[in-house]
Image (cartoon, helix red, strand yellow):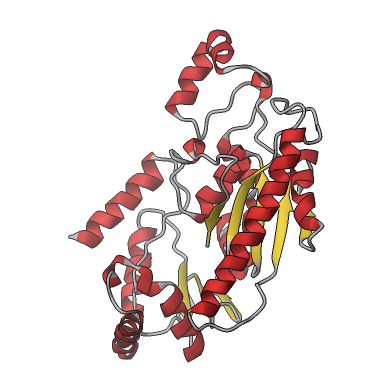
Amino acid sequence: MILEKCREDMYHFLYHENGQVAIYDAVNPLSAGRRSLADHFAAREIQTLFIESACNDNRIIEENVRNVKISSPDYLGWNADDAVKHYLARIAAKIPHFETMDETDLNYIKMINAGEKVLVNNNNFGYLPNRIVFYLLNLHIKSRRIYFARAGTSKEDESYRADASLSLEGEEYAKALRDALVSYREEERQEVIALGGPDEPLRPMAIWTSTRRRTSETASYLQKRGFKLRQRAQMSQLNPGVCEKMSERAIRREYPDEVEKHEADPYHHRYPRAESYHDLAVRLEPIILELERERNDLLIIAHESVLRVLYGYLMACSTADIPKLKFPRNEIVEAG
């Protein structure tokens, strides 16, 4: 049975893979079914937190269906309007059989109208549920574009400690980045108009960088065009520790045991006095929450290690893939 197999996978993740949070994604429409599920998990000493998203605003529902739901494989090749009608009919068919959460003894969060109101019941069992509540409070369903770009090369590009300014090559890169992004956004606007859309100004775009000179100087040419710049210390690159300025060949020669550990688990392994990608992700948690809250377009200019973690989060990449993500300096990567 599929549901039983799903639960077995969750148990394996929580008990044998050091998992902390497992997401059981199902409708669970009836109170009796939810209570049975909570009892089932409690018997295995697993705490259950239900999350219900309720909406009585038809505008929000249709906008969410149009922007998110019909992009699923179920609607591949469908006309957009037909797909929206079909999905709304599926929702209407489920409503008579759905019992909203009001069980006083269960732990749950109820989000109403995409975050206009949030109700929390019995959320009294520790740190992680409180972080989940905080995360949900920062979510929204507005469409926006997020762009990722490397910082330009600096005069001491291989140094972690040195806070060097951009090299001449880095300055030229920063100008090219400005021109390419401004041109791309205007072309997108003109395409919307050509397809019969409104002739409206572009959505505002902010720029986030670390506090390192090469990132803020890369953004400076866009800042001069009126884009707001915000520097964040948490967005500094991954600390390489003892491997700073060392070539791959030198690292393999000096630290063969560490290289073996790193190749076995590049996300969690850290070299001596260094950070792992997991450490970096923990450091970037406040940035990730702000990413979710941001409603305007956003350009992130940072070291490749930071871009890997933030892009990996937004695109649901596995921890095995994050350290391998590539961000060439001749590309602007878009997520939205």
Which of the image's four quarters has the N terminus?
A: bottom left
- Residue furthest to the top in view is 253
**Looking at the image, how many numbered discs can be counted on the residues?**
0
Q: Position of residue 178 (x, y in %)?
A: 70, 53
Front in this rendered view, residue 217 or 318: 217
| Residue at left offset 51%, top offset 48% | 312
Q: Position of residue 134 (x, y in %)?
A: 62, 64
| Residue at left offset 32%, top offset 81% | 87
Front in this rendered view, residue 11 or 103: 11
Q: Position of residue 32 (x, y in %)?
A: 32, 78
Q: To which quarter of the image does residue 199 belong?
A: bottom right
Residue 81: in sight, yes or no? Answer: yes
Left or right of 229 in this view: 274: left
Front in this rendered view, residue 194 or 62: 194
Residue 231: in sight, yes or no? Answer: no
Q: Position of residue 214 (x, y in %)?
A: 76, 39
Left or right of 94 in this view: 53: right
